[in-house]
Structures are given as structure tokens and as C-alpha cells.
Image (cartoon, rainbow, N blue to C red):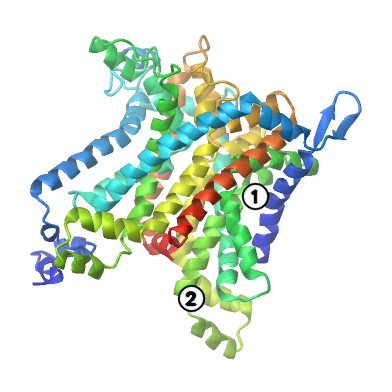
Amino acid sequence: MSTVAVLRSAPTARRRRRDSEKIDLVPLHLYGLRRRTVNIVTLACGLFAVFTLIPIWWIFVSSTKTVPNFNTTFGFWFAHPFVLLSNLREVFSNKEDGSFLQWLTNTVIYAGVGGMGATVLSAMAGYGFARFDFRGKSLLFLFAMAALLIPIAAFAVPLYLVYAKVHLDSTMPGIFIPFMVSPVSVYLMRVYVGGSVPRELMDAARIDGAGETRIFLRIAVPLMVPALVTVFMLNVVSSWNNYFLPFIVNNNAKLNTLTQGLALWMNHTNIAGSSEDFTVLTIAAGMMAITPLIIMFLVLQRYWRGGLLLGGITG
Amino acid sequence: MLPFIVVFFMFLVVPLVYAVYTSFFTDRMIGGTVWSGLANYKEALTSGAFWTGMARTLLFAAIQVPVMIIIAAFFATMFDIGVARFGSFFRTVFFIPFAVPAVVATSMWASMLQTRVGVFVRIFADLGLPNPNFFGPGHLLGVIVLIAIWEWTGYTIVILYTALKSVPREVVESAIVDGASFRRVVTRIKLPIIRPAIILVIIINVIGALQLFTEPYLLSPLAPNVSANYTPTLFMYNEAFSAQFYNFAAAISVVLALIIIIISGAFLLSQRKKGALV
């Protein structure tokens, strides 16, 4: 009896839908696996999940505490009084080193514009690499991919020096434009276009007299949507989380990113003898900073789980 | 196409070229900036401060990358074969740290491991154990390894898992029909097929590990053992912005980039010789 038949005979429709992913799996008993192995592996997963969630649980619990409670009560459980709301209010009202709202707004702009720019640029570049032949194409592509090997750390200080010459240091574009250069995204787009935008369709459109821009916008882009969403998300996250680059090229406090601001607050908590009050404030602010991205991930997981990464890596 | 090339050149290639150019000069107190040839490079390559940092990051990479990839490969194969119950739930949970900035991750672990009121220190005290000085010289690198593993394992699992999903089912089935054991299917069929993905993951993580900066930089106020040259990137940062030796810092940038390119290039070549398609 085939696996598919076994799995499809599952009783309820709901069950069947959930198993759609499993249909492709080779049934476990064929491997000769015992139930004990399954239990041990599940336990290992459980342990690693605990390791993964410990800090998240801790940051949530801690942001509901007062400073004295934070310092004296058990770290993994709540304490009275429960002051989550007043802590969050304090995050928005404290103006030391800048304001959280300002950092948040800046980061949304940088990550939004940077992610958008990276998506548009890499969509155009990936499409060009995949569907047009021109002189020096493979050399240029190799060059772009070689950039993957160059550490950000190595060009951050030089970038700052160039910025200082052209007065882009400590400006908004200076912070978000580098986020737009994403060789990985170009690679992913090239692979995706190669697999999902048929040449025949483009040729047919050309015969019908459509211009290249029109073909790109009306035919290629709609077919590229899953890749566009994934690339956008990956770039939003990496821009949102980036610390090093803004830290090097920006020293205007008004333009600080969330990560820069949090690092400043964190310094107040760490240096011995400085105001301890910042401990819980930093924790609550950290929680506020990670919540939007975690929610975005959970909501959009069917996109990043899709076959794009797969195509990108094995293609 | 064209816009990408323009931005690519202006913001990636120009700084690199400028880095090389500027590294040949030196600021003098008298006489301004003068051509000094390879003097900055000579200084960087003969400086103990650079090499101790370099040795430390190499050690860090040598521990963090293999440990993380073994953990990630284990979970990815288990999820792929479907051994674990609630696999989809665990995959989602494991991926969460990818959404957490390194700054927040470091801040959380730093507070939890903090030597006075950190939650783990208190648990140790309650159990009557001596205070484990997590930020002491012996443990500090271990703490950074732990943070890095926490941050990146889930992402690595997703990459390896999606690669594993592309292994054709027929291949596995016919191997089983031929009597291959579970272990054989994993080590002789699955893992060799996703070798390009494993190599990619190794390269990405080695490059990331060798430019270690954020974690030690943010830990430095808590951990006095983080010196100004703890990693080459920290060294470069301090030379540039604390000491204002920009030309010297540019030379360090170039040396660091070359070392990373040589290491990852050598690794890629050695793998290509063994017949892997990269």
C-alpha cells in the first residue's frame, strides 16, 4: 500500500488538510524507527525550544516588574506589583539619550525604505541577469556574488570615510541606502525568475508589441510576487536588526536606530554605579522592539517557509 | 538592472577602493596626510593587538560554527524525516530568535547572566553553588558562543530544512527498499545531497563569526575582560573612532577582508576539489 493512500485515508477533512505537507514524507516505520527514538528526538526538540524561549519569556516577565522586584525576585516568574503598562509608558516618555518613539520611527523608515529599495533593485537586477544576455554578464554576476564574501565590518569604516567626503555621514539616506545593496537578494531573484518567468511568455508579449518595461511590470513582476515578499521581509529584518553599520556611519542622535538607542540605554544599566533605573526600562524597550518582528514572522510564515529559499540554495 | 549596479558600485565598491587607497597614507601632526606606502600594513601585520584579536575570533569561529551546524543539521534532518512530534510548531519556535536584533539578544543574555543579580547567578546561589563568574576570562568567549548559537541556529535550521525538502522522495524510498538503515539514509543520502547548502551555511557563518563585534562591544561595560582589541573589528573600530587613526583602521579593514576572503575562498576551493558543486 502506498504512503499516499495511507495518509489520505485519514478520517477528517481538517486532518487531511494539515497532512498535505506530510503526504510527501516517507512513513516513519519504513525507516525501522522505534517509538522510543521519536520520544527522544521530541524531547531534544523540547529542550532546545526551552533554550530558545528562555530569554523571550524572561524579557516578558521582567518588563512587568518594578526595579526593586527585578533585582530581588525570581527572574522567571511574575511578582507584585504587575507594572507592565507603566513600564511601557516610561519607555515612551523617557527622554534620556533621545526618545524611543523617535528611534522607532527612524527604524521603520530605514527598514521600510531600505527593504523596499533592496527588493526593487534586486528584482530588476535578478530579472536582468536571468533574462538578458549582454557582454560581461557572467563577470558582473560573479563580481556581485563575490561581494557576499566581503565582511560588512571591512567596508563600514571606509564607507564612513567616503561619506565624510561627500557629506552623507549622519544623514538618513546615508543610513538606508547601504541596506539596499543585497547580493543575496539578487541571487535569489535570479534563481526565482529563472524558474518562474517563462521565456515563451515574454516572447509572445514582444510579438504583440509590448515594450520591455511593460513586459517587466505586467508579466514578470506579478509572477515574482512570492519572491518579492520573501526578499522584502528578509531585508526588512536585516535592516531593522542591523547595529554595526548605522553605529559607524551615524553620530547624529536624532537619527539613531532602535538598536543604537537600546544600546545607549543598555550602557546606563551596565556601567557600575550608574542609575540602575534603566535596567527594567531597557528590558521593556527591548521587548517593544522585538514584538513587531516576531508578530510579522508568525503572520507571514507561509511566505518565508515557501520554496524560495529552497530554490535559492539548491538551484 | 542598471540602478542596482550604480548603487552597488557607489556604496560597496567605492568604499573598498577608497579603503585600499587611503590605507597607503598616514596623518602626520606636521605636514598633513602623506603617502606612506605599506607602512600601515606593516604596522597592522606586526601588531600583537591585531593578532591576539584575530586568534580569538578564529577560536570563536572554530567553536561556534561547527557546534551550531551540528545542532542545526540534527534538527533539520529530524524535521525533514518527520521524527519529532509537533515538528511544525518547533520549527516556528526555533526561528523566533532570527527576529531578535543582536543588540537585544546580547542585552537579554547579559542581564540574565549578570554576575550580581542575574537570574542564573541567583539560581546557583539558591542551590548553594559558588558564583559562576560568567564574564570571567575563562567563560566570556563561551557566553558569546552561547549568544551566537541562540541567535543563528533557527535560521540555519530553516535553510538546511528547505534544502532537505528538495531531496527526491524516490531516492529515499529506493534506498529503504534496498535495506538501508535510518542512519545510512541520513548520512549517506540526505546529507551528501544537501552538501551545497551546508557549505553555504558554513561560509556565511564563518564570515559572520570572523567579524564579531556587536556582542563583545555591548558586553564590554559588564565584562572588563573585553579589551579594545578583543576582536579585529573592535580593534579597527577603536583605532578609527577612539584614536582617530583612520588610515590605519582602513589598513586593518583591508587585512581583515583579505583574511576572510582567503579563508572562505580556500574552503570553497577545497570543497570544489572534492567534487561539490558550489
Q: Where is residue A262 in the image (x, y as percent from the top left)?
A: 52, 29
Tell me the subunit letter for badge 1.
A
Task: Provide residue A35's location: percent of width, then percent of height.
Answer: 9, 48
Pointer 1: residues within 10 angstroms few (<14), some, or many (20+)?
A: some
For mark 2, give the secondary structure.
loop
Residue A88 in view of the camera: no
- x 36%, y 61%: residue: A306
Residue B273 shows in the view? yes
Q: Report the residue that reaches farthest toward the bottom.
A: A207
Name the disc covering residue A126, or none.
none
| On-image quarter of the C terminus of chain A | bottom left
Verify CB contact (< 8 Å) between mark 1 and mark 2: no
Estimate the x, y position of residue B35 in percent, counting from the top left: 85, 36
Mark 2: give few (<14), some (14-19) or many (20+) Cα within 10 Å: some
Q: How many labels does the image show?
A: 2
Q: Which of B118 and B155 is in front in this view?
A: B155
Q: Element type at marker 1?
A: helix
Q: In which quarter of the image is the N terminus of chain A?
A: bottom left
Q: Which chain contains the residue that carries disc 2? A: A
Is A71 on the left-hand or right-hand side of A264? Answer: left
Label number found at residue A197: 2
Give the numbered dot on residue A177. 1
- The reply to whether label 1 and label 2 mark residues of one chain is yes
Task: Answer with left or right where residue A45 lies relative to residue A297.
Answer: left
Residue A226 lies in quadrant: bottom left
Query: Which amino acid type is marked by label 2?
Result: Val
Residue at 66% across, 75% down: A134
Residue under the image location 50 percent in, 56 percent down: A232
Cα separation between marks 1 and 2: 28 Å
